[in-house]
Image (cartoon, helix red, strand yellow):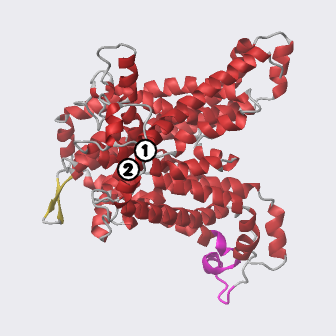
Amino acid sequence: MGLGTLPPPDSSGRLKGVNWRSRLFGAGSFKLWALLPLLVVLVIFTLLPILQLLQMSVSELEFVEGELVSEFIGLGQLDNLAKDPIAGIALKNTLVFVVAVVIIETVTGFCLAVAISRTKTLSILYRSVVIIPLLIPPVAIGTMWSLMYDYNYGLFTTILIELGVQYPPLWTADPDLALISVIIVDVWHWTSFMFLIMLAGIESIPPSLLEAARVDGATELRAIRYVILPIMAPTILVAMLLRTILAFKVFDQIFVLTSGGPGTATQVISMHIYKVFSEQFRLGYAAFLSLMVAAFMFIFVAFYLWASRVLRRRFG
Amino acid sequence: MKQGAPSKIALNLSLLFVVFLILFPVFYIVQTSLKSMADVYSGSFFFEAKMMNYEEIFTGSRSNFAELTRNSLIVSSSVALICGAIGSLAAYSLARLSWQRWVAGGIIVWLLFINMMPPIVFVTPYYLWARAAGIYDTPAAVIMAHVVLNMPLAVIMMMNFFAEVPKELEEAAVIDGCTQWQAFRLVILPIVRPGLAAMAVLVFVFSWKEFLFSLSLTTTSAGRTIPVGIANFVQEFNIRYGEMAAGSFVAMIPALILVLLAQRHIIKGLTVGAVKG
């Protein structure tokens, strides 16, 4: 129960009116007033935009002399989608990117978590350094790596030439290597995230379990395989789902490293919508694509929340 | 846990290598930022460090980092303040003031959705609103977007902190004659102050590094923030490497300070949405 006391009955004795009034102004009203600003923000800035996206995606929008002109075209954006070959490429690139980074970062994050959970003296150093990539601006991560990838003056080229390689790779400028280069940067950036979730999981394993395994003569590797991995399986699964969702957001580093190029080699969904919006200036079509992404992610996130709950109940 | 000395050394050596892998790009950018163009071209490892790139981006005629830094500071601190105020009030109400389960649960799920939705989804409506409201290309437009983006973090982090405060404290305060507002303001808030500070700092850093909305809702240095300024370097025909590196390093400073203060709270905030497995 809340801390509010029951209001005195008002003169007319109509209980409903009393409830309404006391909820807004009575002793227990703080609960509502404290929540209200958040509700206002959520309704105005997250619910209305979705409704507006709905409206925009059945329209053709144009700025004529600074005034927004909107024309209803129904499902006309579906024709635009059919005529847009890059949308399919962007979807494919995004899927390749997401699958690759989730798998790699799960492995690297898990190994890092197992390793760091075993250290004592230097543990604080490792833990502080590892969170750095999650805090610095992704745009700066992009420039750091584009400096290193740079074909003329970059570090990788310089080293490879010193080593006698005649034609060092072009990295982000090579259509075949560009997506891989972007994936490498993402692994540098996001391994730490998987590490943090996995470390929390490992640290919640009772030490007695590992102790018992060791007493029974299990080697380090066998202890990881037969004790840590099975206990961690639900955590790992949840972390992979969450990382999958977050990986779909990728934009900043790709904007800096390749802008989606060369050609369409690293064009991903967010990048494509941004270009439709800012370069082609087709607001209606951009809204339509945004809405499709929102609908897809909505289903995926709902699945994630459901799955993480089920896993927690069954194994938690 | 007993481990042999050799395996312990091997473990630490490989972890030190990981530390090197993470710190090296940061070191590389600092090094480049101290190089003149000639030093960048020659690719030499030894060179005379100069501050000219930093001077150029802040005072040079071709650069506007002074304005961008001002905008970034205005945006990030406003967002931290607004998220701190709205977030801690809402979190207290949701965590402690006995809402029905569907209300509290519904709002949290909604917040998680926003946290996980690709932000590009909100770009077109916000762009139209910013233009309609006449705040396009001002820090106000960017603040609006960043408040929404960071609200899930603010509320969920604060809910965890409030949940740790013993209930008896508020009850005692109310028995002593406090209203609920006074109990919150005078008793509970001071207790969670370290958590509130951690949340505000993290929101500040997240707003500081945000790029997509700062890019889409602005067009000149009247509203742009530092990340947009850095990205502009890359799109020039002749990239000014040294200045780009200097700008990037300036952009990293809040994050590096935060790492020095790193604490448990911040790590929790970094993995919001990862419901414990």
- The numbered mark at residue B108 is none
Quadrant of image for the N terminus of chain B:
top right
For the question of whether residue A250 can be seen, the reply is no
What is the chain identity of the residue bearing mark 1? B
Instruction: Give A137 or B32, whichever is nearer the viewer.
Output: B32
Instruction: Give B49 or A264, whichever is nearer the viewer.
Output: B49
Q: Position of residue A157 (x, y in %)?
A: 35, 24
Q: Position of residue A311 (x, y in %)?
A: 64, 31
> In the rendered image, which residue does mark 1 sit on?
B34
Mark 2 and mark 1 on one chain? yes
Amino acid at dot 2: Asn
Q: Relative to residue B220, is residue B206 depicted above or below?
A: above
Figure quadrant of residue A228: top right
For the question of whether residue B72 can be seen, the reply is yes
Quadrant of image for the C terminus of chain B:
top right
For the residue carrying disc 2, how many other residues have a C-alpha within 10 Å: few (<14), some (14-19), or many (20+)?
many
Whether pointer 2 and pointer 1 mark residues with C-beta atoms closer than 8 Å, the reply is yes
Q: Relative to residue A108, is residue B146 depicted above or below?
A: below
Position of A129 with respect to A263 (left or right) is: right
Circle 2 sits in a helix, a strand or a loop, which is it?
A: helix
Q: Relative to residue B170, is residue B212 depicted above or below?
A: above
Amino acid at dot 1: Leu
> In the rendered image, which residue does mark 2 sit on?
B53
Q: Position of residue A175 (x, y in %)?
A: 27, 24
In the image, the segment drawn in magenta is A10-31
Earlier residue among tags 2 and 1 = 1
Position of B268 with respect to B22 (left or right) is: right
Circle 1 sits in a helix, a strand or a loop, which is it?
A: loop
Figure quadrant of residue A272: top left
